[in-house]
Amino acid sequence: MATSGTLSTFRLPPLPTIREIIKLFRLQAAKQLSQNFLLDLKLTDKIVRKAGNLTDAYVYEVGPGPGGITRSILNANVAELLVVEKDSRFIPGLQMLSDAAPGKLKIVHGDVLTFKIERAFPESLKRQWEDDPPNVHIIGNLPFNVSTPLIIKWLENVSCRDGPFVYGRTRMTLTFQKEVAERLTANTGSKQRSRLSVMAQYLCDVQHILTIPGQAFVPKPEVDVGVVRFTPLVRPRIEQPFKLVEKVVENAFQFRRKYCYRGLGMLFPEIQRVESTEKLLELADVDPTLQPSQLSVSHFKSLCDVYQKMCDEDPHLFAYNFREELKKKKSKNQGEEDAKERERLQQHIEC
């Protein structure tokens, strides 16, 4: 991937610093929204450089806040920058940037979890999935409270080739808590290996490209921040529906310190659990005594392929949820206990 330098044909005119913007509009990070501002423009420039060559690119920035990364993206000579910000307090400061970069910056006051980007950029940008990635990028300093659900949502979009990926294999450069960044990029067998590792790596090339110390943010978070770059793969490493892969992976990691057969067994109703789990592992050629963190993407491919066949044989299997079965079982037991208690009371009254 090409890396952009500092030279550009467009530069923002002199503007108040991000710190001055925060004072001017009396902005404070909202703890309940997990907001942390990155004020050092050298660091925001570095994040943007790590995203690749943005010359004439169309960029979708999520959670711009007071506009630190926004400035660095505009200075990278992009064709157009679309920012989506949920917090209305930041809109005036972003509008100031828009006025300073006529025709470059579009502001949407909305929620990234529900915003539809499919028609935001020109149709001419669309590329075939097998082609090189389009000149479209997603960049963002994500609030910690939405980072995991948002990346899962986008990974499902990658699988379905919709949302931001109607344009092709759109690249993403995003911030996460360092611990989450390490999970996303963790290798098989590592302590950080998790559901996120498998879900990200079966669909994308995932790289932890930069770590930013927490002290660079205002207010200072308790953890450092990792910058992760995602490039969707031409061909996913598991060719099954996203929801099926998610179910198998999620169940496998339920008991992460136990052997994998414990979690995978929860894919099946209790009455057939032992037999079906043995069948799944045998046909997938997976050692039942491996821990979830020791399962590679290749292991999960085999498990998902076999589980899909088992679902084809039993149309009700995929809809099965062990939590629902457990809930019904508890409710039944509670009902039986209540009935016995009523019977004891009735006997006591009759005596």
Image (cartoon, rainbow, N blue to C red):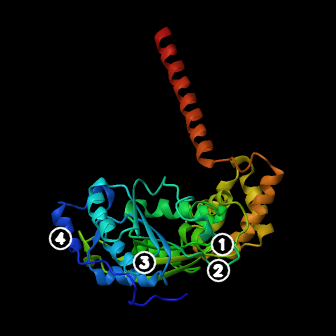
Report which residue position mark 2 lands on: 132
Q: Image check: 41 left or right of 130?
A: left
Q: Earlier in the sequence, mark 1 or mark 3?
A: 1
Mark 2–mark 1 CB contact (< 8 Å): yes
Query: At numbered mark 1, what does the secondary structure look like: helix, strand or loop?
Result: loop
Mark 1 or 3: the one toward you:
1
Q: Give percent across and percent down for residue 2.
A: 53, 89
In the rendered image, residue 105, in percent from the top left (x then y), is placed at 39, 67
Q: From the viewer's perspective, is 326 left or right of 284?
A: left
Q: Which residue is mark 4?
A: 20
- Label located before the other in sequence (3 or 4): 4
**Left or right, residue 172 beside residue 276:** left
Distance from disc 1 to disc 3, alpha carbons, whole Å, reads 26 Å
Name the amino acid, label 2. Answer: Asp
Above-or-below relation of 325 to 50 = above
Q: Nearer the viewer, mark 2 or mark 3?
A: 2
Q: Residue at x 37, y 80 (%)?
A: 75
Q: Position of residue 300 (x, y in %)?
A: 68, 70
The residue at the point 36 percent across, 55 percent down is 86
Q: CA distance from mark 2 to mark 4?
A: 41 Å
Residue 258 lies, with reference to residue 326, above or below; the image says below
Q: Residues within 10 Å of mark 3 (few under 14, many from 20)?
A: many
Would you name the residue on which mark 1 appears?
Answer: 127
Q: CA distance from mark 4 to mark 1?
A: 41 Å
Number of numbered labels in the structure image: 4
Q: CA distance from mark 2 to mark 1?
A: 8 Å
**Residue 54 seen in the figure:** yes
Residue hosting label 3: 227
Q: Nearer the viewer, residue 41 or 107?
A: 107
